[in-house]
């Protein structure tokens, strides 16, 4: 049982870190799009 729990934790951690990377990436893309739009509006 211990080994299963350990591997599950590793999988969960890698999943969470990749999820965070995706969120950060999406935020960066959305921010750059908003910046580009505001620059074009000026």
Image (cartoon, helix red, strand yellow):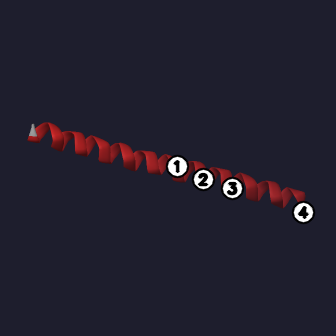
Q: CA distance from mark 3 to mark 4?
A: 16 Å
The quarter of the picture where residue 19 lies is top left
Circle nearer the N terminus (4, 2): 2
Residue that carries the numbered disc 3 in the rendered image: 32
Disc 2, disc 1: CB below 8 Å? yes
Residue that carries the numbered disc 4 in the rendered image: 42
Residue 8 image position (x, y, % from top left): 23, 39
> Dot 4: what SS?
loop
Residue 21 image position (x, y, % from top left): 46, 50
Q: CA distance from mark 4 to mark 2?
A: 23 Å
| Between marks 2 and 3 in the image, the one whose residue lies nearer the viewer | 2
Residue that carries the numbered disc 1 in the rendered image: 23
Residue that carries the numbered disc 2 in the rendered image: 27
Q: CA distance from mark 2 to mark 3?
A: 9 Å
Tell me which residue sits at (77%, 56%) in the image.
36
> Dot 3: what SS?
helix
In the displayed structure, does residue 41 sit left or right of residue 34? right
């Amino acid at each position: 049982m211990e080994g299963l729990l350990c591997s599950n934790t590793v999988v969960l951690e890698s999943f969470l870190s990749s999820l965070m990377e995706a969120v950060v990436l999406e935020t960066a893309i959305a921010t750059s799009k908003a910046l580009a739009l505001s620059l074009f509006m000026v």
